[in-house]
Amino acid sequence: MLKLKDIQAAQARIEAYVRHTPLIKAEPVKERGSREGLLYLKLESLQITGSFKARGAVNKLFNLSSEEIARGIVTASGGNHGLGVAYAGWLAETPATIYIPRNTPRAKAEKLESWGAQVIVEGQVWDDANHAALVAADREGMTYFHPFADPAVIAGQGTVGLEILEHEPNVDMLLVAIGGGGLISGVSLAAKGVNLGIRVIGVEPVGAPTLYESLRAGQLVELPEIRTAANTLAPRLSAPINLEIIQQNVDEIVLVTDEEMREAARWLWFEMGVAAELSGAAALAVLLAGKIRPTQSEKVCALVCGAGNNGFS
């Protein structure tokens, strides 16, 4: 099991290669009286490549041998993790191959190519693309980067949690979007390691409740289908390491609709000037929709985890 010291080591390892993103107070805001508590936004949408994923990919890179790096690196992604891996390949000057599902926006594919990655479209959803990436890694000897079930990736993502609490130690509640579970695994480990009393709330789409259903069942559940436009929050199946960490460190998972995520993305753009994709706005959506109601004295931090086209489409 990963520990706080692993995330602290990751922070020291990657700090020269990723951005220390802003933590801002979301005030003043319109309709302030309709919500209680003090709201902070952690703007990982301003991270290199546009999301927190660069953190995990760079930490994974720096845990590899020179021989593993030289073989080239490969992954599957809905876009954001692929961008982090493409960035890692660019840093190491080694070939990066990214398998993406057909539901990945073309703009993400073009951005991957701009970092020098080879992009291959495979399957309808991430799970299909991931199968192809694993086959390619075995066939061609490339080093595989898992987007959420790798301890080095989880530790890298957890550095977001350390930054939040270094900037604002008295945060009472963290709101974190969940795809496969790598981000919330790392952030919850870091947060609970620093402050055991902090509440960590996960957020998933109604159309992709992978970890929500797994927690209810007490074991991993594979969804029969995905019904959300938030493709970066949409694997059908998580992994044992993520479920175990989430069971121990996440207080609750709440589901939001695509329209609630779109409304949160609109709010971020028109109120804060922050451009976020649907997944990037998911954590805020749970608050704006009234599905979590903090007390007047609570300090709440929503992680804006990915940049995009404002989520309006």
Image (spheres, helix red, strand yellow):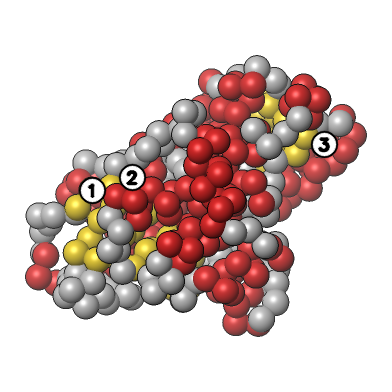
Residue 128 visible? The answer is: yes
Residue 137, numbered label: 3
Q: CA distance from mark 2 to mark 3?
A: 33 Å
Q: Marks 1/3: CA distance?
A: 41 Å
Which label's residue is closer to the chain start, 2 or 1? 1
Q: Position of residue 33 (x, y in %)?
A: 9, 70
Q: Which mark is residue 43?
A: 2
To which quarter of the image does residue 10 belong?
A: top right
- Amino acid carrying mark 1 in the image: Ile
User: Are the two marked residues, 2 and 3, in contact with CB atoms closer than 8 angstroms?
Assistant: no
Residue 147 point in image, percent of width and height? 63, 47
| Label disc, if present, on residue 24 of the rendered structure | 1
Name the quadrant of the N terminus.
Answer: bottom right
* Image point (29%, 50%), residue name: 167
Q: Is residue 43 above or below residue 107?
A: below
- Which-is-in-front pick, marks 2 and 3? 2
Q: Are marks 2 and 1 in contact (CB under 8 Å)?
A: yes
The residue lying at 32 percent from left, 75 percent from top is 292
Give the crowd class for mark 3: few <14, some 14-19, many >=20 residues within 10 Å.
many
Q: Residue furthest bottom?
A: 217
The residue nearer to you, when weighing 21 against 137, is: 21
Q: Amino acid at mark 3?
A: Ala
